[in-house]
């Protein structure tokens, strides 16, 4: 078994879900690919972060693996796999339901992040000033990437 491949025990858990969505016949007359091999190819891409074109040849053509990935994503196979794995982990007492995690994969970026106009009139600042002394006062290291921003406020005596 290779590094990012699914083990036999893992495959036994997800096989009914992955194979239920398997096409029965190929449209072009070619035999369908082994779904376990396709899943291993998808996991290799996700684990390494490599582009699809850099997929090793042992998984087959990258377009074929991507086709399975896209079809499974569209039909909800991955969501069903997550559900099965969560049930298995919950049965073994390995999930703490009081712990909340937030996935940042769906955080919406500003329009300007995609190159749109910022619609800021000339002469105005686009971001508040950053004060590094505030980070030092908060007990953060000098090389910390955290910076605190402040706005200038006028003090008005009462």
Image (cartoon, rainbow, N blue to C red):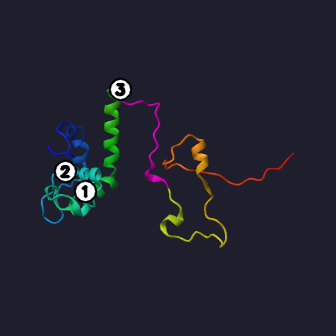
Q: Looking at the figure, which quarter contains the N terminus? A: top left
Residue under numbered circle 2? 35
Question: Which residue is more in the foreground, 19 or 92?
Answer: 92
> What kind of element bears circle 3?
loop
Comes first in the chain, label 3 or label 1 = 1
Residue contact at pointers 1 and 2, CB within 8 angstroms: yes
Q: Which residues are magenta?
A: 94-107
Q: Quadrant of residue 28?
A: bottom left
Disc 3 versus disc 2: distance between alpha carbons?
A: 30 Å
Mark number, residue 68: 1
Residue under numbered circle 3? 93
Q: Identify which residue is drawn at 47% across, 36% down.
A: 100
Q: Identify which residue is drawn at 27% across, 52% down.
A: 48
Q: Identify which residue is drawn at 34% across, 33% down.
A: 87
Mark number, residue 99: none
| Residue 138 locus on image (x, y percent) | 59, 41
Q: Is residue 129 above or below residue 93?
A: below
């Amino acid at each position: 078994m290779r590094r990012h491949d699914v083990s036999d025990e893992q495959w036994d858990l997800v096989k009914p879900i992955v194979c239920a969505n398997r096409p029965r016949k190929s449209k072009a007359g070619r035999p369908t690919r082994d779904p376990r091999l396709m899943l291993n190819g998808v996991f290799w891409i996700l684990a390494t972060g490599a582009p699809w074109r850099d997929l090793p040849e042992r998984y087959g053509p990258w377009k074929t693996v991507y086709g399975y990935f896209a079809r499974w994503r569209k039909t909800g196979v991955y969501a069903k796999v997550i559900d099965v794995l969560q049930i298995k982990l919950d049965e073994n007492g390995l999930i703490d339901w009081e712990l909340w995690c937030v996935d940042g994969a769906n955080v919406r970026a500003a329009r300007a992040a995609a190159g749109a106009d910022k619609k800021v009139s000339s002469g105005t600042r686009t971001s508040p000033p950053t004060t590094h002394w505030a980070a030092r006062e908060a007990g953060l290291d000098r090389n910390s990437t955290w910076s605190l921003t402040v706005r200038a406020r006028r003090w008005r005596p009462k």
